Image (cartoon, helix red, strand yellow):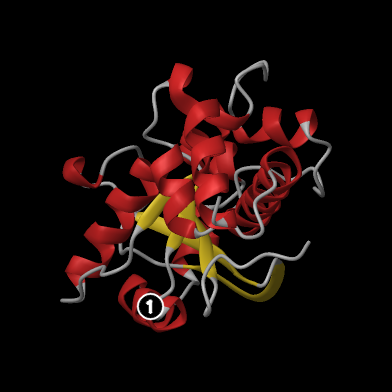
Amino acid sequence: MPELLNPSGIVVLDFETSGMSPLQGDRAIEIGAVRIVDGEIVDRFQSLMNPGCRISGFIEAYTGISNAMVQAAPPAAEVMAAFDDFIGDNPLVAHNASFDRRFLDAELQRIDRCRRQDFACSLLVARRIYPEAPNHKLATLVAYKDLPTDGCFHRALADAEMTAHLWLCMVEDLRDIYGFTEVPFALMGALAKQKKHRVDGYLRDRAQEMRGL
């Protein structure tokens, strides 16, 4: 799928965590990410991480990540430093991005680093592009659009890969429907903020602007 999102690409990421909120002491236990350049997945990052605490039986069952796996993993600080280097200056994408953004910011803060990249939410964009979908959970959208999957959910790299395929599918659908020659990252972020009834007009106006009409 040809596309020009950003000269250096975007990074699509997913965290598995010990709970729902870093403000309540929950920690990241796995990070998975892929880099997209010119419409292709060109690089991957995946690692379990040891936050120095035990995870619950519920999380073990939900993710398949055991306490033994976490305890054998590299320290969270080491993984997050490597991941921050992997991100570079690339814009970021996640499904239900507010969740992943909170954990990314919290884990970076622990190693005295700070996120500097823009963050887009594929869930919010999907709500605008596919309002007729049964719901906008990642698994539902993967089935709805018949996207590549190995059937594994709730592991970080698998979820990041599926989110990347969803993002590329949405970009391609915008190109096909509205005639965009390119779909900038900023347009996708702005689209997520549009009111539902304004989406079609917004996209038609942006496409005309890009074609110089």
Position of 109 with respect to 83 (left or right) is left
Looking at the picture, does residue 51 appear above or below residue 144? below
Position of 49 with respect to 146 (left or right) is left
- The residue pinned by badge 1 equals 89
Q: Which residue is drawn at 50% across and 28% down?
A: 201
Looking at the picture, does residue 37 appear above or below residue 56? below
64, 100: nearer the viewer: 100
**Callout 1: SS:** loop
Residue 31 in picture, x, y percent from top left: 49, 62
Q: Residue at x 25, y 59 (%)?
A: 105
Position of 169 with respect to 146 (left or right) is left
63, 147: nearer the viewer: 147
* Amino acid at pointer 1: Asp
Q: How crowded is mark 1: few (under 14 residues within 10 Å), some or many (20 or more)?
A: some
Q: Residue at x 44, y 61 (%)?
A: 92
Residue 181 in picture, x, y percent from top left: 66, 58
Residue 172 in picture, x, y percent from top left: 72, 49
Q: Residue furthest front?
A: 213
Residue 143 in picture, x, y percent from top left: 79, 31
Q: Is residue 83 visible?
A: yes
Q: Is residue 16 visible?
A: no
Looking at the picture, does residue 159 appear above or below residue 197? below
For the N terminus, the quadrant is bottom right
